[in-house]
Amino acid sequence: MGILILFINFAVMIRLLIVIVSFLFAASAASAQTVQCEDTCGHIHGIDLSHYQGNVFWEAVSETKMAYVYLKATEGQNTIDDKYKRNIDLAHRYGLKVGSYHFYRPMVPQERQLANFMAQCRPEDQDLIPMIDIETRSGLSNEDFCDSLFKFIRLVERAYHCKPLLYTFTNFYNANLSGKLDGYKLMIAQYTQREPVLNDGRDFEMWQYTGKGHIDGVNGYVDKSRFMGRHVLREIRYRHRYRNAHSYY
């Protein structure tokens, strides 16, 4: 009987130990999920948002470590992000530095894309230089794609009197744009723990390091980025020297 009781007590202890270990593992995993990149480094961090994030609680966002936000304004010739006006008004109200971006469609006439962007992205509303989101060649050859893209970039430069920030992925840059964007500031997207490397060896200002970030005030995933090395926020500040900047032809 004594041996039986000892065996039962040993079995209970094993089960209890398993429960404790499982609890500690779950707690550790939960803790790891709540620790974000901005909690563990000294770089300047920010986010970009569009209608995909729904209604954002900007007061909560303003209390995080995010220093800036890029908001999707437009895409192609006619698409307007239906959360843009709300987002830019509230982001300003709660003190964030705000920029706006256009998703570029290479097959759509550049002048029409610019008109779409300028109707939403007013210079007086911008703290940061405009950004062009470059993710597709739309079936064009590399030569035709680059001709299309650079025509649009030049139109944006003339309209806003500054060189835009250019956003693209590491692989897309290396395959299509390597060595062609000297003189332009870049935000490079690569969702790994390893920092991006561009095959032309050039420096870049910003790294979008995740498309599945979490932040107070935003339901679901959010894109997060940070500045590289010694690059700082003032490098992308929009300088309001040309209030009547809407003459571009």
Image (cartoon, grey):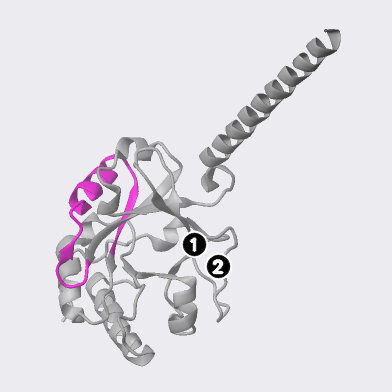
Single out the residue that lies furthest toward the front.
Answer: 1
Residue 84 vertical placement versus 35 (above, below): below
Task: List the residue tagged with mark 1.
Answer: 207
In screen coordinates, is 127 left or right of 89? right
Q: Position of residue 206 (x, y in %)?
A: 48, 62
Identify the secondary structure beneath mark 2: loop
Q: Residue at x 26, y 64 (%)?
A: 241
Q: Which residues are magenta?
A: 75-101
Disc 2 and disc 1 in contact, CB within 8 angstroms: yes
Q: Position of residue 192 (x, y in %)?
A: 55, 60
Q: Is residue 10 something one can see in this rendering?
A: yes
Amino acid type of the residue that numbered disc 1 sits on in the rendered structure:
Trp
Residue 119 on the magenta span: no
Tell me the distance, in whole angstroms, between the alpha carbons under discs 2 and 1: 8 Å
Q: How many marks?
A: 2
Q: Position of residue 227 (x, y in %)?
A: 50, 58
Identify the secondary structure beneath mark 1: strand
- Give neighbour class at mark 1: few <14, some 14-19, many 20+ (Cα, 10 Å): many
Task: List the residue tagged with mark 2.
Answer: 196
Quadrant (top left/top right/bottom left/bottom right) for the C terminus:
bottom left
- Give neighbour class at mark 2: few <14, some 14-19, many 20+ (Cα, 10 Å): some
Give the numbered dot on residue 15.
none
Q: Position of residue 119 (x, y in %)?
A: 14, 64
